[in-house]
Image (cartoon, rainbow, N blue to C red):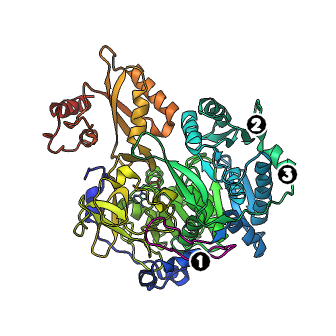
Amino acid sequence: MSNRRGPDFETRMAEDEEIPPSPQFVEQATVTDDSVSDEFEENWPDCWARAAATLDWFDPYESVLPDDEPPFEWFAGGTLNACYNCVDRHVEAGAENRVAIKWESHLGETRTYTYQDLYREVNEFAAALRAQGVEADDVVTLYMPMIPELPIAMLACARIGAPHNVVFAGLSADALATRLESADSVFLVTCDGYYRRGSAIFLKSKADDARLKAAHDLEEMVVVEHLGETEHLGAGQHTYEELVAAHAGAEVAPVERAADDVLFLIHTSGTTGEPKRVEHVTGGYLAHVAWTSQTVLDLDPEDTYLCTANIGWISGHSYVVYGPLALGATAVMYEGTPNYPERDRIWDLIEENAVDVFYTAPTAIRSFMKWDTSLPASRDLSSLRLLGTVGEPIDPRAWHWYYEHIGNGNCPIVDTWWQTETGGMMITTLPGVEKMKPGSAGPPLPGVGARVVDGRGEEVPVNEAGYLVLTRPWPGMPLALRHGHRWGEEAAKLDVDGWHYFTGDGAKVDDDGYITVLGRVDDVINVSGHRLGTMEIESAIVGVEGVVEAAVVSVDDAEAGGIHAYVTLETGVSGDDDLRERIAAHVRERIGPIATPDAVVFTPDLPKTRSGKIMRRFLENITNGEEFGDTSALQNPEIVGELESIVRDG
Ligand code: 6R9
């Protein structure tokens, strides 16, 4: 397998420390009975009824999973509405005054929505969307920053059965246009702009650009006046405020959706140049995220919970919005970044709101470590009961820092492995039952089948690296996998018997069945927790005049992170700083700032196999100053040494 792996690979391979959850935690944990795994094993797939039981169904399902062959129709025959489950039922149960969303702006201004407030505004906006012509199954694209109107719009869509298609606000106009086309979406909700580190970013103008670039025109655009600077509104464009006011007090009955009706679309990076469209369905997805919020995040309705993920990505969909709200908990949401206005922003939010459960990413933890340990120490973080991480492997050093400096040595950490494609958590400890091993995510959740195999599909020996495959269907699986698609290019590489999904990750298993995820082994790279496709970035780079070929690799330095691009040029074109800047600008325009290369290396050639495939592995070795292996399979082995000296000598 490729050695796309973190700098701490060796440490993680050697780690064998075990830490039990504290007795105080176990005493109150939602799941404390270790028979739950056996019960799921003996009673599979019916065990997943426990996840479905976290929801209210209009029509009960007839079968948990009618067949063990595709199509996998989880909770077949059941009908429900995700918005009803996240909002109405809590109001009906008398929790109308409980806070659903507590939002803080980049300047510290707060807005609080009780479940009753959420009910009112979601209904009003649902009525407004209907009046704009949105019907069930019409896709509504949401290009919005971290403002309360984003979850409100998601829930309003869910209420009327219109799948949403959230596009991360940091992506460019081109990226939005591609995603509008991919989703065949003619409705867009956006906002005039937002602040990031004190400066305003004008989103509406990016949305207008995307509108011109997309192959089809938009029918309606709704603009939230967040900066209060909405200039010109064209035909078919309305402000959110005006629409909601026009439907003040409106109520819209939640539309009954079949368990496998689509709840939302989301695009992620795959192994091709195009974004990968993933569709999640109402019943299985919601059951999966509600159940894992309850059992893994240990959330109770009384809890206040902070997840730092942006709603533009899957973590925000599942564990800022749907999971916590389905359980009726209080979600804290903030605009901006953890270091603006100050580097103690997160600790401030935790103290102010007496946050019980905190879920973040290793990249954020590494920044917190770098910033200053005295910052969290100066705050009262004693409300915290459980910590979680997601997005990339966490090295034991960062794990220990998190455990000691944030959790005060008594909050369990759940290191949750999952993906856009899985919808919800798949591999993690159950915090009240299982010991933690820093650096290792843990065993597969009860009911989840995961194996680490070699290229022939054989299970690899304990503690040896192999490919991580999921071997059983799960409720949160997306539409394509339900219907038996193999997500071709990935599945085709492995020869595994029976139904399986290849995750694109490398991993190893220890003798307790704990899985340590080692990182991506396909053409997807993980840069500071952002998932990016090498092909996507390379296609953008070759779009620059004078460029012939490009290959990008990720930098292993966990703190610096980043992307290096190796680029060949047309004869006569000079590789200078001006061209470097044009390349960077073009990537920003095509994808967004997160994909911009940190270094561009001009080279006469790229290392290639005899069949002409670029061997990024050698470029990774060069970038990261590692030994490179056997180059004899290359058609141009001499280029590896040449490139090494180009990089070394700057
Ligand atoms: C939820 C999310 C998925 C990829 C995944 C893997 C990496 C996520 C991880 C982890 C090690 C963990 N990843 N959680 N690696 N330990 N706890 O991040 O979705 O953006 O689709 O990324 O992230 O490489 O394949 P997504």
Question: For residue 553: magenta?
Answer: no
Using the rendered image of the protein, determine whether residue 484 is visible from the camera's viewpoint. yes
The residue wearing badge 1 is 62
Give the side of residue 387 with respect to residue 505, left or right: right
Based on the displayed image, in which of its 4 quarters is residue 187 positioned? top right
For the residues labelled 2 and 1, the Cα–Cα distance comes to 44 Å
Are circles 3 and 1 on residues that touch, CB within 8 Å? no
Q: Earlier in the sequence, mark 2 or mark 1?
A: 1
> In the rendered view, would you say 158 is above or below 387?
above
Question: For residue 59: magenta?
Answer: yes
> In the rendered view, would you say 538 is above or below 480?
above
Number of residues whose C-alpha sits closer than 10 Å to that of mark 3, classed few (under 14), some (14–19) or many (20 or more): some
For the residues labelled 3 and 1, the Cα–Cα distance comes to 38 Å
The residue wearing badge 2 is 237
Number of residues whose C-alpha sits closer than 10 Å to that of mark 1, classed few (under 14), some (14–19) or many (20 or more): few
> Which mark lies nearer to you, 2 or 1?
1
The front one of 157 and 532 is 157
Are circles 3 and 2 on residues that touch, CB within 8 Å? no
Q: Which percent across, then down, holds residue 147?
A: 68, 49
Q: Which percent across, then down, holds residue 261?
A: 61, 61
Based on the displayed image, in which of its 4 quarters is residue 546 positioned? top left
Looking at the rendered structure, the kind of residue marked 1 is Glu
> In the rendered view, would you say 562 is above or below 383?
above
Give the side of residue 645 with respect to residue 264, left or right: left
Q: Which percent across, then down, holds residue 516?
A: 33, 64
Q: Secondary structure at mark 3?
A: loop
Report if the beta carbon of the residue with label 1 is closer than 8 angstroms to ligand 1.
no
The residue wearing badge 3 is 247
The front one of 262 and 603 is 262
Residue range highlighted in magenta: 55-77
